[in-house]
Amino acid sequence: RNVPDLTVRIGLATGEVVVGTVGAPTAKTFAAIGDTTNLASRLEGVNKVYGTTVIVAEETHRLAQHAVEARELDIVIVVGKSEPIRIFELVGRAGSVESAMLELRHLYVQGLEAYRQQDWDTAEHRFLDCMRLRPDDGPSRVLLERIAEFREVAPAPGWNGLWRLGEK
């Protein structure tokens, strides 16, 4: 009774880490340490930007794509990194995702492709189509906001769709 809503965000990355007990004898903790751990932590925070709950790195998606359904969200540079990473939203187990979500994913992919080609009109239409299917679709909202900004101030020559995130 009266259980509060709980929102959980998860970031998943695949790679090598050091796992074990670290710290002083009186303040030991079990931890995973390394670049992959840091990336997963950053991806957890990226969920706040896109209004999502589970974001996976490209390598994780590649390894799990036979078992899960995901939609590509963006190519970003997370805080503390210099290399871009393609990120995906985990949407469910393979074969068990509702058709409306699959349709949304299809429209979003079309919008993302147009966005990367700076075809703002087509991208905007596709993301608005996504919002009609799911009015609270955070990723579509984010890219619609970017498109509005790019209509005011065009991206630099040679821009390829990469987005640098400014907060953890």
Image (tube, rainbow, N blue to C red):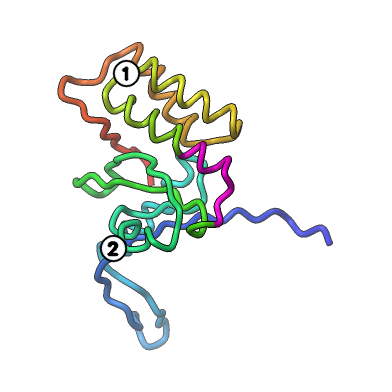
Crowd rating for badge 1 (residues with CA inside 10 Å; few <14, some 14–19, many 20+) = some
Residue 97 located within the stretch drawn in magenta? yes
Q: Position of residue 156 (x, y in %)?
A: 20, 20
Residue plotted at (59% across, 27% down): 132
Q: Residue furthest bottom?
A: 25
Circle 2 SS class: helix
Q: State how far apart marks 2 and 1 are (Cα).
A: 34 Å
Q: Residue furthest right?
A: 1
Identify the residue position indicated by label 1 in the image.
119
Identify the residue position indicated by label 2 in the image.
36
Q: Residue furthest left?
A: 158
In the depicted structure, whether residue 151 falls above or below residue 163: above
Q: Position of residue 53 (x, y in %)?
A: 52, 51
In the depicted structure, whether residue 24 falls above or below residue 143: below
- Residue 143 or residue 166, whichever sits in front: 143
The magenta segment is: 96-105
- Residue 92 or residue 82, whichever sits in front: 92
Front tag of 2 and 1: 1
Residue 104 located within the stretch drawn in magenta? yes
In the depicted structure, whether residue 59 falls above or below residue 34: above
Crowd rating for badge 2 (residues with CA inside 10 Å; few <14, some 14–19, many 20+) = some
Residue plotted at (23% across, 49% down): 81
- What is the count of numbered marks? 2
